[in-house]
Image: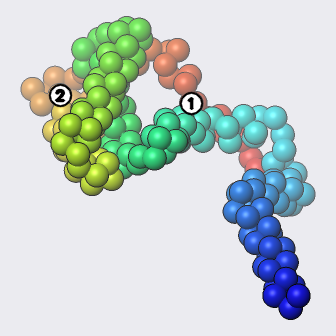
Amino acid sequence: MTTARPVQEKAKGSFALDFLYKYGTLITVLVLIIFFGTVADNFLNPSNIINILRSISIVTIIAVGLTVSLAVGGFDLSVGSTASLANALVISMFVWHGQNIGIGIGLTLLFCLAVGLVNAFLVINFKIDDMLMTLATMFIFQGVALTYTRGATVSQNMIMPSGDFATGKIPAMFEKIGQVHGSSLL
Protein backbone atom coordinates (compact mmCIF):
# COMPACT_ATOMS: atom_id res chain seq x y z
CA MET A 1 0.00 0.00 0.00
CA THR A 2 2.82 2.43 0.72
CA THR A 3 4.28 1.94 -2.76
CA ALA A 4 1.03 2.90 -4.50
CA ARG A 5 1.13 6.48 -3.24
CA PRO A 6 4.53 7.46 -4.76
CA VAL A 7 3.48 5.86 -8.03
CA GLN A 8 0.32 8.02 -8.10
CA GLU A 9 2.33 11.16 -7.28
CA LYS A 10 4.81 10.30 -10.00
CA ALA A 11 1.96 9.79 -12.42
CA LYS A 12 0.57 13.26 -11.62
CA GLY A 13 3.97 14.88 -12.11
CA SER A 14 4.49 12.85 -15.23
CA PHE A 15 1.13 14.02 -16.61
CA ALA A 16 2.09 17.67 -16.09
CA LEU A 17 5.45 17.17 -17.80
CA ASP A 18 3.85 15.27 -20.66
CA PHE A 19 1.26 18.03 -21.07
CA LEU A 20 3.94 20.75 -21.12
CA TYR A 21 6.07 18.69 -23.49
CA LYS A 22 3.17 18.33 -25.92
CA TYR A 23 1.58 21.76 -25.61
CA GLY A 24 4.30 23.97 -24.10
CA THR A 25 5.14 25.70 -27.37
CA LEU A 26 1.50 26.51 -28.10
CA ILE A 27 0.98 27.78 -24.55
CA THR A 28 4.07 29.98 -24.86
CA VAL A 29 2.88 31.41 -28.18
CA LEU A 30 -0.57 32.14 -26.73
CA VAL A 31 0.96 33.83 -23.67
CA LEU A 32 3.18 35.96 -25.94
CA ILE A 33 0.22 36.94 -28.14
CA ILE A 34 -1.79 37.96 -25.07
CA PHE A 35 1.17 39.86 -23.60
CA PHE A 36 2.05 41.79 -26.77
CA GLY A 37 -1.63 42.28 -27.58
CA THR A 38 -2.10 44.11 -24.29
CA VAL A 39 1.22 45.99 -24.25
CA ALA A 40 1.32 47.19 -27.89
CA ASP A 41 -1.82 48.79 -29.27
CA ASN A 42 -1.17 47.87 -32.92
CA PHE A 43 0.00 44.32 -32.35
CA LEU A 44 -3.34 42.65 -33.07
CA ASN A 45 -4.13 44.83 -36.11
CA PRO A 46 -4.87 42.74 -39.22
CA SER A 47 -2.01 44.34 -41.18
CA ASN A 48 0.48 43.44 -38.45
CA ILE A 49 -0.83 39.86 -38.22
CA ILE A 50 -0.40 39.54 -42.00
CA ASN A 51 3.16 40.89 -41.74
CA ILE A 52 3.99 38.36 -39.03
CA LEU A 53 2.55 35.48 -41.06
CA ARG A 54 4.42 36.60 -44.18
CA SER A 55 7.64 36.88 -42.19
CA ILE A 56 7.43 33.31 -40.93
CA SER A 57 6.05 31.74 -44.11
CA ILE A 58 9.38 30.59 -45.57
CA VAL A 59 10.56 29.02 -42.32
CA THR A 60 7.16 27.37 -41.92
CA ILE A 61 7.29 25.86 -45.41
CA ILE A 62 10.78 24.50 -44.74
CA ALA A 63 9.63 23.14 -41.36
CA VAL A 64 6.72 21.32 -43.00
CA GLY A 65 9.15 19.70 -45.42
CA LEU A 66 11.48 18.73 -42.59
CA THR A 67 8.52 17.25 -40.70
CA VAL A 68 8.14 14.68 -43.48
CA SER A 69 11.71 13.54 -42.85
CA LEU A 70 11.18 13.49 -39.09
CA ALA A 71 7.93 11.53 -39.44
CA VAL A 72 9.79 8.56 -40.92
CA GLY A 73 12.50 8.71 -38.25
CA GLY A 74 15.05 10.63 -40.30
CA PHE A 75 16.70 14.02 -40.06
CA ASP A 76 17.90 16.36 -42.80
CA LEU A 77 20.49 18.97 -41.87
CA SER A 78 20.84 20.22 -45.45
CA VAL A 79 17.47 21.98 -45.72
CA GLY A 80 18.91 25.44 -45.06
CA SER A 81 21.62 25.01 -47.69
CA THR A 82 19.06 23.64 -50.12
CA ALA A 83 16.87 26.69 -49.48
CA SER A 84 19.76 29.11 -50.11
CA LEU A 85 20.69 27.23 -53.28
CA ALA A 86 17.04 27.36 -54.41
CA ASN A 87 16.96 31.09 -53.70
CA ALA A 88 20.10 31.71 -55.73
CA LEU A 89 18.82 29.55 -58.59
CA VAL A 90 15.34 31.05 -58.88
CA ILE A 91 16.55 34.65 -58.72
CA SER A 92 19.35 33.97 -61.21
CA MET A 93 16.80 32.45 -63.59
CA PHE A 94 15.05 35.82 -63.63
CA VAL A 95 17.98 38.23 -63.41
CA TRP A 96 20.75 36.45 -65.32
CA HIS A 97 18.82 34.33 -67.79
CA GLY A 98 15.64 36.40 -68.28
CA GLN A 99 13.28 33.49 -67.69
CA ASN A 100 9.61 33.91 -66.83
CA ILE A 101 8.12 33.03 -63.45
CA GLY A 102 6.88 29.56 -64.49
CA ILE A 103 10.22 28.39 -65.84
CA GLY A 104 12.18 29.91 -62.94
CA ILE A 105 10.05 28.31 -60.25
CA GLY A 106 9.61 25.04 -62.17
CA LEU A 107 13.34 24.52 -62.74
CA THR A 108 14.09 25.41 -59.13
CA LEU A 109 11.53 22.91 -57.84
CA LEU A 110 12.96 20.21 -60.11
CA PHE A 111 16.47 21.01 -58.92
CA CYS A 112 15.41 20.85 -55.26
CA LEU A 113 13.69 17.53 -55.93
CA ALA A 114 16.96 16.27 -57.41
CA VAL A 115 18.82 17.47 -54.29
CA GLY A 116 16.38 15.51 -52.11
CA LEU A 117 16.80 12.43 -54.29
CA VAL A 118 20.60 12.69 -54.02
CA ASN A 119 20.30 12.78 -50.22
CA ALA A 120 17.88 9.84 -50.21
CA PHE A 121 20.06 7.84 -52.62
CA LEU A 122 23.20 8.37 -50.53
CA VAL A 123 21.49 7.54 -47.23
CA ILE A 124 19.63 4.47 -48.52
CA ASN A 125 22.21 2.90 -50.83
CA PHE A 126 25.36 3.55 -48.80
CA LYS A 127 23.71 2.94 -45.40
CA ILE A 128 25.26 6.10 -43.99
CA ASP A 129 23.46 7.73 -41.05
CA ASP A 130 21.09 10.38 -42.38
CA MET A 131 22.31 13.06 -39.99
CA LEU A 132 25.94 12.52 -41.01
CA MET A 133 25.17 12.33 -44.72
CA THR A 134 22.97 15.42 -44.77
CA LEU A 135 25.61 17.29 -42.75
CA ALA A 136 28.09 16.50 -45.52
CA THR A 137 25.66 17.42 -48.30
CA MET A 138 24.82 20.63 -46.42
CA PHE A 139 28.39 21.81 -46.89
CA ILE A 140 28.43 20.61 -50.49
CA PHE A 141 25.22 22.49 -51.33
CA GLN A 142 26.51 25.60 -49.56
CA GLY A 143 29.66 25.42 -51.66
CA VAL A 144 27.67 24.94 -54.85
CA ALA A 145 25.48 27.96 -54.01
CA LEU A 146 28.52 30.14 -53.26
CA THR A 147 30.31 28.98 -56.40
CA TYR A 148 27.25 29.48 -58.58
CA THR A 149 26.68 33.04 -57.31
CA ARG A 150 30.42 33.76 -57.04
CA GLY A 151 29.76 34.75 -53.42
CA ALA A 152 27.57 37.69 -54.49
CA THR A 153 23.94 38.46 -53.81
CA VAL A 154 21.95 37.99 -57.00
CA SER A 155 19.90 41.13 -57.67
CA GLN A 156 18.52 43.21 -60.50
CA ASN A 157 21.07 45.45 -62.28
CA MET A 158 23.97 43.70 -60.56
CA ILE A 159 27.39 43.86 -62.16
CA MET A 160 28.21 40.58 -63.87
CA PRO A 161 31.74 39.09 -63.94
CA SER A 162 32.09 40.38 -67.53
CA GLY A 163 31.54 43.95 -66.29
CA ASP A 164 28.07 44.25 -67.85
CA PHE A 165 24.91 44.80 -65.86
CA ALA A 166 22.35 42.03 -65.44
CA THR A 167 19.44 42.83 -67.72
CA GLY A 168 16.73 40.50 -66.39
CA LYS A 169 14.00 41.54 -64.01
CA ILE A 170 12.32 39.78 -61.11
CA PRO A 171 8.66 39.34 -62.10
CA ALA A 172 6.26 41.63 -60.23
CA MET A 173 4.14 38.66 -59.12
CA PHE A 174 7.24 36.96 -57.66
CA GLU A 175 8.18 40.14 -55.78
CA LYS A 176 4.83 39.98 -53.96
CA ILE A 177 5.63 36.57 -52.47
CA GLY A 178 6.56 37.08 -48.85
CA GLN A 179 6.58 40.85 -49.16
CA VAL A 180 6.25 42.54 -45.79
CA HIS A 181 4.66 45.97 -45.59
CA GLY A 182 6.04 48.36 -43.03
CA SER A 183 3.89 49.11 -40.03
CA SER A 184 4.36 50.42 -36.55
CA LEU A 185 3.99 48.02 -33.66
CA LEU A 186 4.03 50.56 -30.85
- Residue 82's disc is none
Density class for disc 2 (Cα within 10 Å; few <14, some 14-19, many ≥20) is some
Side of 22 relative to 165 (left or right):
right
Distance from disc 2 to disc 1, alpha carbons, whole Å, reads 27 Å
Residue at position x 75%, y 40% in the image: 48
Q: Residue furthest left?
A: 162
Q: Position of residue 60 (x, y in %)?
A: 57, 39
- List the residue tagged with mark 1: 178
The one of 170 and 131 positioned closer to us in this rendering = 131
Residue at 75 percent of width and 56 percent of height: 23
Q: Is 49 located above or below residue 28 in the figure?
A: above
User: SS class of the residue under badge 1?
Assistant: loop
Q: Earlier in the sequence, mark 2 or mark 1?
A: 2
Viewed as shown, does residue 65 lie left or right of 153?
right
What residue is shown with label 2? 160
Q: Quadrant of residue 17?
A: bottom right
Q: Quadrant of the C terminus?
A: bottom right
Amino acid at dot 2:
Met
